[in-house]
Amino acid sequence: EDCQLQNMEYNDNLLDKLLLRIFRNLVTKNTGGVTSERAGILGLVDQARTFLLQPGQTPEAQHKMVRDTLAGLMTPVLPPFYRIFMAGIVPGTDTQLGPWFYAPYLTSFVTPTFFGFLVGPSYPNRRKDGQLGGLVVEKCKFLQESGCKGLCLHQCKLPAQQFFQDELGLALTVSPNFVTQECQWSFGETPLPPAEDPAFP
């Protein structure tokens, strides 16, 4: 079912504009040169759609492109720091003592500042289990401007879940609502496999 609400007007600040420019450049790099002359989020949507529609495109290639882009955005410095101090992973080993109890909440508290350029306004809330570590996106900017469930699922939801688990050591469940374009992010919550996830058709 399509979104039934009016479009939201987004007011990007200087940080949002800078991060979007960096993110778009990384997408160009990780897609082998896919770009767009359109400005801002609409240009990013063009890039995402062009990559999606390439001949022989696969969900796995889309997931990898987004994971690589997220890794580039975080720089080589932040993931190791996060893995130690948030996920509790012992450096140089596969031993994980965490995630530490504060990791889901602190992640939900910091995320709105650095991902607003992509999803728009968001704020911390509680996960469905009642614990801290939830984040609700009021009306996802990327989903609103793309109007595409496939882009949402394969160039946001799944690769974000994979990136947090595999690269940062913290489980994440992303739960989009396609009727309202609201989206619930639950840090520390193990996601369902796609075959069992109601977000998938």
Image: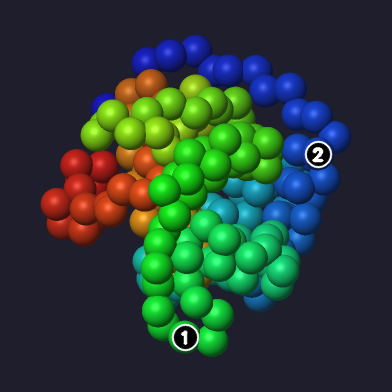
Tag 2 residue: 15
Residue 83 located left or right of residue 184: right
Residue that mark 1 sits on: 93
Residue beneath the point at 21% across and 53% down? 192
Decide if residue 106 is in sight here. yes
Of labels 2 and 1, earlier in sequence is: 2
How many callouts does the rendering have?
2
Q: Height in image: 200 above or below 123?
A: below
Above/below status of 18 relative to 179: below
**Taking 107 as reference, is 115 left or right?**
right
Picture coordinates of residue 15, whole percent (x, y): 81, 39
In this rendering, is residue 3 above or below 116? above
Residue furthest top as drawn: 6
The picture places residue 183, in percent across and down from the top left corner, at 41, 32
Label 1 residue SS = loop
Residue shown at 61% from the left, 71% from the top: 80
Return the residue nearer the eye: 192 or 53.
Answer: 192
- SS for dot 2: helix
